[in-house]
Image: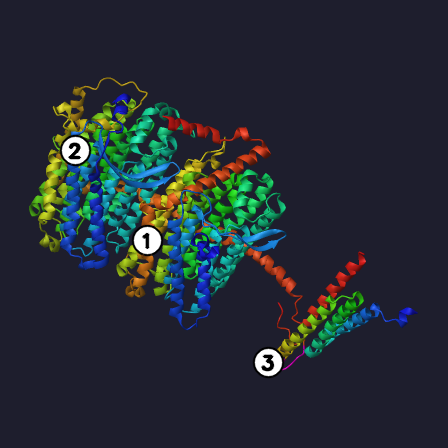
Amino acid sequence: MTQFTHIGLGHFLALSAILFALGMGGVLTRRNALSVFMSIELMLNSANLAFASFARYTFTMSGHVFVFMAMVVAACEVAVGLAILLSIYRSRATLSLDELDLLKW
Amino acid sequence: MWIFTLKEGILSHVVLLPIVGALVIIFMPNARATAIRLVALITMLLGLVLGVWLWFAFDPATAQMQFQNPPVEWIAIAGVWIKYSLGLDGISLLLVELTLLLGPVVILSSWSAVTDKVKEYHVFLLLLQTGMLGAFTAIDLFLFYVFWELMLIPMYFLIGVWGGQRRIYAAIKFFLFTMAGSVLMLLAIIYLVYMTPGNSTFDLVLLTNNLSSNPLKPTVQFVCFAAFALAFAIKVPMFPFHTWLPDAHVEAPTAGSVILAGVLLKMGTYGFMRFAMPLFPYAAYEAVPIISILAIIGIIYGALVAMVQEDVKKLVAYSSVSHLGFVMLGLFALTQAGVQGSLIQMVNHGLSTGALFLLVGVVYERRHTRQISEFGGLSKVIPLYAVFFMLAVLSSVGLPGLNGFVGEFLILVGTYTAEAGQNVPLFAHPKIYAVLAATGVIFAACYLLWMFQRVMFGPVTKEANKKLKDLNAREVVYLTIIMVFVVWLGVYPSTFLSRSKKSVENFISVVERGRKITEERELGLASLSPAVPVEKEKHERDGQ
Amino acid sequence: MGHETAIEIVNQGQAAAYIALIPLLPFLGFLANGMGWIILRDKWPRMLVNVIAVSVVFISFALSVMAFLDLKALEEGAYLFVEPFKWIEAGGVDAPIKLVFDRLSAVMCLVVTGVGGLIHLYSTGYMSHDKSFARYFAYLNLFTFAMMLLVMGGNIVIMFVGWEGVGLCSYLLIGFWYEDPEKASAGKKAFVVNRIGDFGFLVGIFTIFWLMGTMDFAAMRDWVIAHPEVMSGKTLLGVSVATIIGIALFVGATGKSAQIPLYVWLPDAMAGPTPVSALIHAATMVTAGVYMIGRLNFIYAYSPAALMVVAGVGVVTALFSATIGFTQTDIKKVLAYSTVSQLGYMFTAMGVAAYAAGIFHLTTHAFFKALLFLGSGSVIHGLSGEQDMTKMGGLSKLMKITCWSMFAGYFAIAGFPGLAGFVSKDEILWKAYSNSVHPAQFNQIVYLIGLVAAVCTAIYMTRLMMLTFFTPSRMDPEVEHHVHESPWTMTVPLIALAILSAVGGIFNWPHALGGGASFEHWLHPMWMEVNTTHEAHGHASHAMEYVLMGLSVGLAVGAMASVAFLYYKYREKTAVIAERLGVLYRASLNKYWVDEIYETLVINPIKSISYYFLFRLFDANVIDGAVNGLAGLTKGLGHAGGRMHTGKVQTYALYIAIGLLVILTFYLGTR
């Protein structure tokens, strides 16, 4: 029963996978751009979690570096992304992804 | 640092100067149009000054690359360094000088014609200049490719933004045609460098030496030659890849047409001379009948189609197809006279067709039409213009005493005296090539003089033509610059022929050697080489 | 002349820099007047133009005389030359700027600058009312320069430069009054037709260079002497090289010298000012082909076949164009066809290897045809531009000098005994009959055609003189009122040329009539004997010469007298005669519809094929069709693929997710 008492790498990765799947589900199904945006953050963080777990498991620092890197990028992305969403809302008065479909053939 | 020395840094100065000018212009306000034009002009003039220095510093006694910089390692791909290295020999010298000469001319020609987006226009012109100069001087195969593609983009915008009615169509057509060829060329370059043993370098001099003493298998040569040839043939343009040219010319602004005809087309013929033929000599020899026949079709076809054009610019564009046919024919005659003539003809075509486009631009600026039927009797109204127009037409017709004749004559003599293979069929006989090509001189007279007559002679029928203004001082200046060289090349071509002599000799011997070795090694045909009886005959002739 | 002597005379060139001035001076005149016209336009003083233009040509004439005297002092076969600088030099091709003054070019130089100078002088009067006189004289000087290059060129490329140069000037001067579309057209026609000939000339040059490896005349001659077996034995594509060269060069000559089938430009060339017709289209340029064959006689010497073509085309042209001359009413057109006919005579002479006779006829023709043209110009000038002979008449009293000087030319061309034309034309007919180059039957046919053509010449020239000067006046009263004799600048050249036409024959008075044939002796070292396979057919006796001479003189004088009588007494009958002749008359009047035939058979098909087949169908549909088809295919595929792009971000995300799953499945599945 050690598998249940000892929290190991597998648990972290499973959590990461669950979070990723949730995020992906959100990205694919939510209509509101803001929700999709938050779901993307969730996916990013699931990847971060996987990185951190591996770093812990292998006792190296490179995984942590990636996490920091991803966090910085995510922060920038939030800034730019929210700005874009804001300006889209200003010009289109909606954030429904179904209506934001100018970028097609 | 080598960059600060004239001997080694001069080519980098020549190539990069326009970019510096472009950078200056980028930081200028768009409203200061005249200042922008001045900066562009000064940049081009500085380039010309460097060109004059190059001309005199050039040593015509050697076929080696000159003014070479110590190669700078740039990018390593799979262990092979792409290097920034420039050099100049007698072949590229003439074309570099032509480019530098046309630089200030095109700036002057668009002084009052381009008033929209002046800043961007000049930035593109200067970038184009760098691209062309770089392509002519690059020794590194990959660097050449970079410059080759670099030329494409400014030209695309020049046609697409400052062009005529159907400019977008023409620009895209131009872009796609050129891209289609050059992608295949890139593949061939990569194959050559990475997949053939003993050739892992992009350095052209090394590659040429390798391949002429240790040539590739015939099949590999054919495939690679075909890929290179396609890229260059489209650029030349050879029949049947020529249809982008009339569209691009008609839609391009005057300066674009001048550069397109004057320099860009030469990139194709230069490519054949510098890359396709020396690198794959056996394939080049085997391709002589195909290329020659296509060249002759181009000469006659271009001339006939030019004859029936209603638009002056389109007429001149088709005449380019005809003239470049001569260049290709001379190049593939592979005789000293033919190749030197072809090189001179490249310069000639740049000057005389450039002049024709400039002159068409002059009336277009005043009348906003190029239809022949819209004109008539202009000689009476604008006599000074008529003098320059006549000179340009005559030079294009190939009148002795002007430049066109020297090139055409040498090409035809070179082709006529080229050795025929043994038992060749009649259609592959160089004498037949020369005779057929010589009919081009008849057609040239037909279409150019007929056009001249319809535009310049007869009564002035259109009201709008009665008040046309004659050339102004600026126009006289740039046309005179070209005409000086038109006459110079016609009367004293030795100035130019002597500088390319050694390099052309070297070019022919490299191709010859490469072909012989390929034949001996792969086909065991050494005993059948047709060069032997001709040599013997020459001895007899010298002996008497 | 045997081969041995020929080898001796080689390389007897003497450097003489001053002969470069002979062409250079007219060129400077061209520059001065040309620049003056471009920069100052009408303000460039007329007097200065006249003085510059005329004096440069006369100084050139003086220099030619000087060079002639220098040359005379040298031994036979020597020549003067100057080689200022290298011109085209690449891979064995070596064509320096080289001018040569030998016995042949001496004759040509004297004729061109002498007659040319007189015509320049005449032009100062004729063009005195024209606004563009500076341009006119610039062109005329440029022409003289090009013509001098042609005749003095030391290698065939320089000759070709002159050859094309004179063609250019001809183009510019025919279209001098370019506001008239017809005149501009005539100029272009001349240039294009000449270019067809030049194509042949170029092929000839290439073959010479390929064969001999040189383009220098002296070196070519040496080569031919050293390689007689190659000249007569070597073939190219089954034809003897000498014949190929000979025929190709003759194609050039038919263009420049207006022979069948390329003569069509010359009658149209009369659109130019009349002095131009006299100088370029009668006296000098059109004879370039004759000169060229004379210059290269050492090549023709090895090809009797080529010579036969030359003689045949020449004599047929002589008769053919003479018959057109019967019916033309434009005075200049009659003279134009007459020129074509006389050029035919010259080629006949060259073709039977009577080179000296051909060149001598060239010289006398330059005198009398220039005279006739200038005379007609004087008439046209006096009649305020009228050229139609049916609207002239009775001018003998109003324009005495013109009339009587033209008479000398008329008698000369018609072959009246004693005058220049008689001497030269009779020599040609005699040589055509008696030469040993061609088979006897050929000679007899050529002689016969030549004789008929001579009679024709007498007839149409008599008609011209009668209609213009002696029949009752049919002039517009308005025009008649203004008729005046021309100024001295125009009459002096007329008189000078009249004297030359009258007494020019003494330069080559035949042995048969007790003369010295000095012209023939002067040129003799230039020629090489024809390498023919025929036996000489019998010795041609003086007796036979007298008989033939009498025959041609009798026929010519008879024709002159009867036609003159017809026009004097029964002029109204001429219309009846024309009526009776029916289709023959119309054929002659319409110039045998040759222009129309060329138009329908050659020009229009080329234009239609170029436009409809090549441009519209091939370029636009086949090539661009293929390209556009490819583009269309790509576009279609793109459109099909584009349907996947709904523009909805979530669809794209779904694709990504599916892609991820596929990759994962693949990755895990293959483990």
Please tell me which residue is depicted at 20% across the width and 39% down the height of the picture.
Answer: C19
Which residue ends up furthest to the right in the rendered image?
A1
Whether residue B331 is visible to the viewer of this picture, yes or no, is yes
Q: Quadrant of the N terminus of chain C?
A: top left
Marks 3 and 1 close (CB-CB < 8 Å): no
Kindly report the distance in space between the C-alpha atoms of the residues bearing marks 3 and 1: 59 Å
Locate the C terminus of chain C and report the quarter of the image it occupies.
bottom right
Q: Are marks 2 and 1 on the same chain?
A: no
SS at badge 1: helix
Foreground tag (2 vs 3): 2
Foreground label between 2 and 1: 2
The chain ID associated with circle 1 is B
Q: Residue at x 11, y 35 (%)?
A: C502
Where does the magenta region start and end?
A: A86-96
Q: Which residue is mark 2?
A: C70
Q: What amino acid does circle 3 point to?
A: Ser
* Residue A90 in magenta stretch: yes
Per the image, the residue denoted by label 1 is B483
Q: Secondary structure at mark 3?
A: helix
Mark 2 touches mark 3? (CB < 8 Å): no
